[in-house]
Image (cartoon, helix red, strand yellow):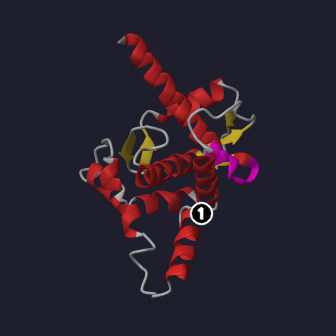
Amino acid sequence: MVQALAADTAEKKRRLMEAAMAVLDGCPARSMNITNLNKALFYLDLFELRDAGKTATEATYIALAQGPVVAKYDKRLVKPLVDAGLVVQDQRGDAKPLVAKAELDRFEFLDERVRKLAANIGRAVASRTAAFISERSHENPGWKVAFADGVPRPIDLHLALQEMVDVDPWLEEDDDDTAAAFARADRADDEGLRW
């Protein structure tokens, strides 16, 4: 039982590291504010839950005033990346960006499709300020319910997934041209977030 729990914890740690490095691979200078990285991972997991039926990281997200974050992200996300020599955490005013300093030796849990999605999300999120990303994440129904009384609580990702359904290009389609509809849906999937 203890061995199985340790293996499960090691896999979750590795999944989170792989996802974070894949997100950073899509960012200019492979650097991203920790606030934005938390949101990028949240949205990566929502896209994967929608498309694959499970999240990429298997992480738990907590609703904080700044929006969704990986639970205990300082210990579960930042510390393992720094300890592995993959990133350094910078200090730029109030911002604490993670800067990739090395490549991940291999990806065990994220396939090429998920890594591409993560990089696309990284690019989209990196182009926005932490304030914008936090404010945008406050529109998520899972975050709203979890933070309704101002007390940080775990976010129900199935409820949070509703945001992804609400932006489904198929629901917005009023065109009779099926080929054009397929092309637009494929582009939307390839682009990740549409901010």
The majority secondary structure of the magenta stretch comes to helix
Label 1: few (<14), some or many (≥20) within 10 Å?
some
Which of 173 and 80 lies nearest the eye of the viewer? 173
Q: Residue at x 53, y 74 (%)?
A: 182
Residue 47 rendering spot, x and y as whole percentages: 47, 55
Q: Residue at x 63, y 52 (%)?
A: 116
Q: Amino acid at mark 1?
A: Asp
Answer left or right for 17 relative to 8.
right
Which of 21 and 109 lies nearest the eye of the viewer? 109
Residue 41 rendering spot, x and y as whole percentages: 51, 47
The answer to whether residue 136 is above or below residue 87 is below
Residue 167 rendering spot, x and y as whole percentages: 42, 69
Assign the N terminus to one quadrant of the image: top left
Tell me which segment is drawn in magenta.
22-29
Q: Residue at x 75, y 36 (%)?
A: 101
Residue 19 in view, yes or no: yes
Assign the C terminus to one quadrant of the image: bottom right
126 in magenta: no
The answer to whether residue 178 is above or below residue 53 is below
Q: How many numbered marks are there?
A: 1
Task: State the SS at label 1.
Answer: helix
Answer left or right for 164 relative to 27.
left
What residue sits right under mark 1 in the picture?
190
Residue 2 rendering spot, x and y as whole percentages: 38, 11
